[in-house]
Amino acid sequence: MTSSRPKSNRHIPSRLLIACGIATVAALAFTACTSTPVQAPVSSTALPSGATSTNGTTTGESTGSATLRGLDKARVQETFQTLAKELLVPGAAMMLRTTQGDINLTYGVTSAGGTTSVSLDDHIRIGSITKTWTGTVILQLVQEGKLKLEDPVSKYRSDVPNGDNITIEQLLTMRSGIYNYSESYELSKALDTTPQRVWTPEELVAIALPLPVYFGPGEGFHYSNTNTVLLGLIAEKLDGKDFGQIVGDRILGPLGLKQTSFPASDSSGLPEPFSRGYMYMDNLLTLATTKLPADLIAKAQDGSLKPNDYTDANPSWTWAAGQGVSTAGDLITMAEGLTDGKLLNPDLQKKRMDSLVPVDADNPGAALYGMALAQFGPLYGHTGELPGYNTFMGRDPQNKVTLVVWTNLAPAPDGRDPASTIAKAIIGDLYGAAPSVPATRSTSEPATPDG
């Protein structure tokens, strides 16, 4: 489920969670990197009739997978363009792949007030979608016998409180209870006052570990970038390489993702061509809410209030939870590799897909999240948000439908996650019902399942 928004992974908040993408999931799925506290998703639309969840339960009266409607290209285009305009994004892009045809669409410009049109080749920050890389790397290490899902975190990190009782699997599924550093006042203030600061992963962990836990290990769900940063550090320890090299060797290279990267932490730039990213608020404000007051929403709508440019804010505060960069085309390939078993053996792939469960145990219709993977109706993937960027990536492997949407504004003035909102509507066009989306912002924003 992110930038100046510490909560990169949303619902995964803001906010900072935006970087993470989980809030979108709750809405859609989750966000990962913003600074707002991440809570269980607040929206929980039921899966389309007949859609089968990863734990084997079927919603609706029919059995089997969700039924794909006939592809109405005009309707999808209208949905995309209407919502992009309504959400006040300067620019947006979407790619849809189906057996009935493909749709590639762009909207607006790469910079607020500019004249360069958005292209599908534009690079953007993907926030909490990065978490799927980290999760895949950990599962590959399990596959290779270098660690076990049931291993206690204390086996690899002696500094984690109650680490003897927190497992690697609980870090992957956001059920460790460990505090999300993206929700801290300390990080949000620093992101606003020193946006170019280069953060080390150990500095991020050091913010979180002294703070109160949300619950005991395995006793609940809370989207936390700290979980994913710890997993990245464990991967470096076991693989003996820098995390960027690990991702390149294990994920980007095998999938042929030539326009995707895990940039160095001291880099704030984006490869050409790229779209600039905008946000109306600052990180501290998003700790409380991502929605502007009504009078300011009106000013944003009439153009008298302009968004702030967060493009060059250093994203190192998200690290393994949200630092990735990609393009729409590469995200399509990534979604297919993630869900179609191109990166894991069949046993581990099945275990991962079966790991998705409602983030709210008391609400079976709630958004689903598992081992660094979210479910949006019949689509599996993740969302990501960092200040200025919101991205949705999802794949229905049974019907062979892949959808990617990104926007260069996050959040919208009314607090919605633009890309996740658009994606949710398009999924409704395709299947006849909009899904719950886990939040995955990088900050502490509410999850919709980075972030």
Image (tube, helix red, strand yellow):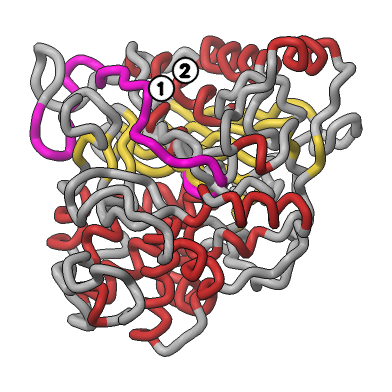
Q: Residues within 10 Å of mark 2 (few under 14, many from 20)?
A: some
In the displayed structure image, the side of residue 237 where residue 104 appears, left or right? right
Mark 2 = which residue? 425
Residue at image position (23%, 32%) is 360
Instruction: Work out whether 165 lies above or below 391.
Output: below
In the displayed structure image, the side of residue 410 where residue 385 appears, left or right? left
Residue 102 lies in the magenta-colored region = no
Residue at image position (29%, 58%) is 172
- Camera-nearest residue between 213 and 127: 213
The part of the chain drawn in magenta is 31-57
Secondary structure, mark 1, is helix
Q: From this viewpoint, is residue 114 visible?
A: yes
Circle count: 2
The location of residue 31, given as percent across then percent down, is 47, 42
Residue 52 lies in the magenta-colored region = yes
Q: Residues within 10 Å of mark 1 (few under 14, many from 20)?
A: many
The location of residue 99, given as percent across then percent down, is 37, 31
Mark 1 = which residue? 427
What amino acid is labelled 2 in the image?
Ala
Secondary structure, mark 2, is helix
